[in-house]
Amino acid sequence: MLLEVKDLYVAVEGTNILKGLNLQVKKGEVHAIMGPNGSGKSTLAKILAGHPAYEVTKGEILYEGKDLLELDPDERAREGVFMAFQYPVEVPGVSNSQFLRLAYNEKMKHIGDEELDPLEFNDLLKEKAKIVEMDPKFFKRSVNEGFSGGEKKRNEILQMAVLEPKLALLDETDSGLDIDALRIVANGVNQLKSEENAVILVTHYQRLLEYIIPDFVHVLANGKIVKEGGKELALELEEKGYDWVKAAGQ
Amino acid sequence: MTQAGKETIYTKEFQKSFENANQPEWLKNLRKEAFDYFTEEGFPTVRNEEWKYTSVNSEQLAVNRSSELDVDDEQIEKILTDIEGENRLVFVDGILDEELTLLTDLPEGVKIRSFAESLEDETFKASLTKLVEFDFNGFTALNTAFIEQGVFIHVPKNTKVESKIHIIFIGENETANFARVLYVGEQFSEAEIIEQYTRTREANYFTNVVCEVNLADNARLVHTRAQRESHSAVHIITSNAELNRTSVYDNTNITLGAKLSRHDVNLSFNEEGGEAWVDGLYLVEDGQHTDTHSRIDHKVKNCHSHQTYKGILDGKSRAVFNGKVFVHENASGTDAEQSNKNLLLSNEARVDTKPQLEIFNDDVKCAHGATVGQLEEEELFYLLSRGLHESLARNLLTYGFAEEIINKIEIPSIKKELDEAVLNRLHAKLEA
């Protein structure tokens, strides 16, 4: 088992958001977490990535059998947890390639693999950029600075491609994307998923799931999973809306 | 010699310098008048509103001036290696070292000369102390009293000096270093000056430099000042620029060194259509105090000023920023932007920032702001979530904060030096 979330309670600034959530994810699986606004689905992604504003008040999270909550966010990343942000942060003055190489080398150092110098890394980056059809001119630009919404999301998937996580959390990656950008991002994720990793898609809409087919769909309402099923559940939600599941969460 | 009964720590040095100086009468009179003013007024104290946050302990100031060039040649060579194929003037302990001076083939009429060689020059005589009068404060008075060392640059009409002009001040011994830079750019002239303040070793010296920049109609000057003085040194600069019709002045001030540094950077638009940048970055750590006071005067219509000052403070350090922008009554069409942003890396660091706009005209566009803060938690989390260790993530964000100013500097050797200086201080390991 790659990830086991057991009876998880999470609070932010004293308000309970997740109230007894359970989830199991194995390598090779794609899970979709769906739910209405405020249901806690982004909170799940953030708590897994280790966002400091979120506090676990009860329950546990096991990652590869170990206590994930014991690890700092950067340690989690080096262990293979990756979150694509809903709102990627701009880092002025730091070039994309510089940033990615630092992150890549931190991970290589951690797993005892070879670090790359700027030239070697540039070759790697060029290859990875093809996955999200990204122009190398973006390498030199400051991280996310002045990027369009679509470019930021593609940049997130490029980071995922470089870091090759075992567990990828995509937090509303489809939000704000036009159809072409959605296709490129989804296509990128599809190329990156394998039997060795797992993907958790956090999404409000079903539309992303037309491109990235989930093995499991979990519907979250009021901090709990209220319904689970296969990919057909997403379609049902699209048709019926969230009102019928909201009632179940009360 | 000086006023009866009053003595200052500089009286002896002044008398020695004054008596030995082979200078024309007008200059000697000016010097004497300035020294009398200094004797009377002394250095500014915290009772002076402009010096409210910066107290100068005159007991800690070096007094003696360097009489001979007793220097570490190897260290100086190291400092100068990067500056090839350009003009350079090198002051060591405040004394212009003719042997280290290099001048390229300058276009006809361009003068880059020591003060000693300029004493009979009409432009020199007309311009010296025109923009910074001795009674601006005790430091400018003292500097004027000791006028001997300096560089005079005169670029004639329609002339561009292609090769950059480096003026390098190197501190080595515990001396009081008084020098001046006097720049006169005639109509449609262009040049680039880089002032560097550096040291061969950690010494408690005192730099007191006055810089005057006169730009005639359509004259352009890029003026960069990089200060990496000894951390035991006191560094005082007073720099004034005057712009005329559609002149352009791009000034960047980088502060990394000195125990105490103070910049008075003033600029005045005297004719329409001028544009100026007065930017700065100060990066200070434990035990350092830096103070920038600037004043930008929009006296006439349709001028544009930009001012971005950024500060990064660590340890028990302190920064002061006071930026005044005056938009005078008849200065319609003025566009003035000013910002001062500070990043505090320690709880003991302190910033006093005061952007100050005074507008006496309605038809203007002015924006100003100041921020003091710590690194954004969300930005930090973003970097951590990519596996960067916290110290590296913090360094990277801090570096990014400074880059906006560092990127303005187009001279590779200085940019590299600054990048390294910033990074070394941040203990980061960022190969390009």
Image: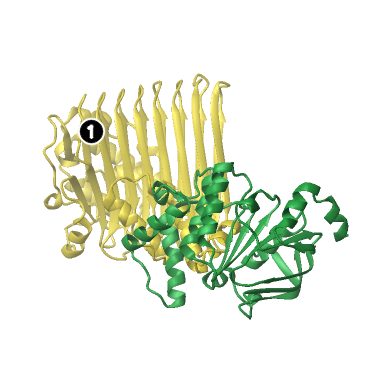
Chain colours: A green, B yellow
Locate the C terminus of chain A by quadrant: bottom right
Residue B19 x, y percent position in the rendering: 19, 47
Amino acid type at mark 1: Trp
- Mark 1 element type: helix
- The residue pinned by badge 1 equals B26
Above or below, comparing residue B20 to residue B125 in the picture: below
The answer to which image quadrant residue B384 occupies is: bottom right
Residue A228 x, y percent position in the rendering: 76, 63
Above or below, comparing residue A231 to residue B23 in the picture: below
> Which residue is the extreme one toward the bottom?
A65
Which residue: 71% across, 51% down?
A: A204
Q: Is residue B217 left or right of residue A188?
A: left
Q: Is residue A207 left or right of residue A153?
A: right
Front residue (pair B142, A128): A128
Chain bearing mark 1: B
Q: Is residue B11 left or right of residue A3?
A: left
Which residue: 73% across, 52% down?
A: A235
The answer to which image quadrant residue A150 occupies is: top right
Which residue: 15% across, 46% down?
A: B85
Front residue (pair B18, B177): B177
Q: Is residue B417 left or right of residue A127?
A: left
> Is residue B114 among the parts visible in the rendering?
yes
Which residue: 56% across, 44% down?
A: A149
Above or below, comparing residue A125 to residue B366 in the picture: below
Residue B301 x, y percent position in the rendering: 46, 20
> Is residue B376 among the parts visible in the rendering?
no
- Label 1 crowd bin: few (<14), some (14–19), many (20+), radius 10 Å: few
